[in-house]
């Protein structure tokens, strides 16, 4: 299994692309238009969610400490009486400038079982923006796939950080090995579901005596794999063989 390595430059580059794409999608929608991939949300709710996330990152990512900030949840409502798009513009620009200026290894709190470094937030900002850019574009039914390498990094984040951190939204009673293949990158992951937990298996180092036979194989473009586990696409968008129900153990949205 080929290792994927992302860097600050990679995540900043993704943020510079995905943020403007999100903003461009807003131009085609009324503030109260529904967001089909986020039930009960309007476009303004989506703006508030993402803009609030940026604002919140900026309050703590540069503190240089690993203790939690006072406010553990970002405000996600656009203030009354302001233009939502202009409000988002300010927050995106500020967050981008902050993240451009921060070092990956700067100590920084995060709520996951991951290194307490600013790199966590560089990655999370890029991935969070990419998925919600897709949501914004889906309001007009013309969403573009997430760039393949960015999507693969998103799958890695899901498997090595978010799901181990308890962010799963699927069933937690699944057992067995799941094999995922990103067909556009020739990259694969093997994941052992353990009920409440999971383990990534590296086929280059796994012991031959350890049974790593996959009970289900899901293949598709990296973007489709990522969006399926985030609940944006159905598993029927993938080529699946074996025990399809195990895929539910990897859902995060």
Image (tube, rainbow, N blue to C red):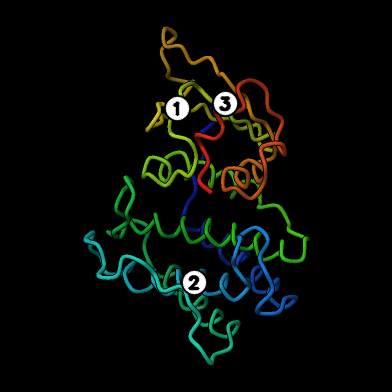
Mark 2 or 1 closer to N-term? Answer: 2
Q: Residue at x 31, y 48 (%)?
A: 115
Mark 2: few/some/many CA within 10 Å (<14, 14-19, 20+): some
Give the distance between the C-alpha atoms of the residues marked 2 and 3, in whole angstroms.
Answer: 35 Å
Image mark count:
3
Q: Residue at x 67, y 46 (%)?
A: 233
Please tell me which residue is depicted at 36% across the width and 45% down the height of the picture. Answer: 165
Mark closer to the observer (1, 3): 1
Q: Position of residue 16 (x, y in %)?
A: 58, 67
Examine the image and state in which quarter residue 84 appears: bottom right
Mark nearer the viewer, 2 or 3: 3
Q: Which residue is mark 2?
A: 96
- Furthest residue toward top: 209
Where 203 falls versus 234 (above or below)? above
- What label sits on residue 193 in the rendered view? 1
Residue 120 picture location, percent across and down: 39, 54
231 or 127, which is in the foreground?
Answer: 231
2 or 3: tag closer to the N-terminus: 2
Q: Look at the numbered disc 3 and give the secondary structure of its residue.
A: strand
* Distance of label 1 from label 3 (alpha carbons): 11 Å
For the point 57% across and 48% down, the residue is: 230
Residue 179 is tagged as 3
> In whole angstroms, how far apart are the C-alphas of marks 2 and 1?
36 Å
Circles 2 and 3: CB atoms closer than 8 Å:
no
Which label belongs to residue 15?
Answer: none
Residue 219 vertical position relative to residue 155 in the rendered view, above or below: above
In the picture, measured across the screen, residue 166 lies left or right of residue 6, that is: left
Determine the image quadrant of residue 53: bottom left
Nearer-N-terminus badge (1/3): 3
């Amino acid at each position: 299994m080929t290792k994927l390595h992302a860097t600050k430059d990679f995540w900043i580059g993704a943020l510079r692309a995905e943020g403007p794409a999100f903003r461009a999608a807003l131009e085609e929608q009324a503030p109260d238009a529904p967001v089909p991939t986020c039930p009960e949300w309007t476009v303004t709710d989506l703006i508030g969610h993402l803009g609030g996330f940026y604002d919140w990152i900026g309050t703590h990512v540069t503190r240089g400490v690993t203790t939690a900030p006072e406010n553990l949840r970002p405000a996600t409502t656009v203030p009354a009486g302001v233009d939502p798009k202009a409000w988002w513009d300010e927050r995106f620009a500020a967050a981008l400038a902050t993240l451009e200026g921060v070092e990956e290894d700067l100590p920084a709190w995060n709520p996951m079982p991951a290194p307490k470094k600013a790199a966590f937030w560089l990655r999370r900002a890029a991935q969070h923006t990419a998925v919600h850019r897709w949501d914004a574009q889906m309001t007009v039914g013309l969403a573009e796939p997430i760039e393949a390498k960015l999507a693969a990094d998103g799958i890695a984040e899901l498997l090595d950080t978010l799901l181990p951190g308890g962010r799963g939204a699927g069933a937690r009673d699944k057992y067995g090995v799941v094999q995922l293949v990103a067909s556009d990158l020739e990259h694969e992951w093997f994941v052992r579901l353990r009920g409440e937990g999971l383990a990534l298996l590296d086929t280059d180092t796994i012991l031959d005596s350890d049974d790593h036979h996959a009970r289900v194989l899901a293949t598709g473009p990296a973007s489709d794999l990522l969006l399926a586990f985030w609940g944006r696409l159905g598993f029927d968008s993938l080529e699946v063989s074996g025990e399809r129900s195990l895929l539910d153990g990897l859902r995060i949205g």
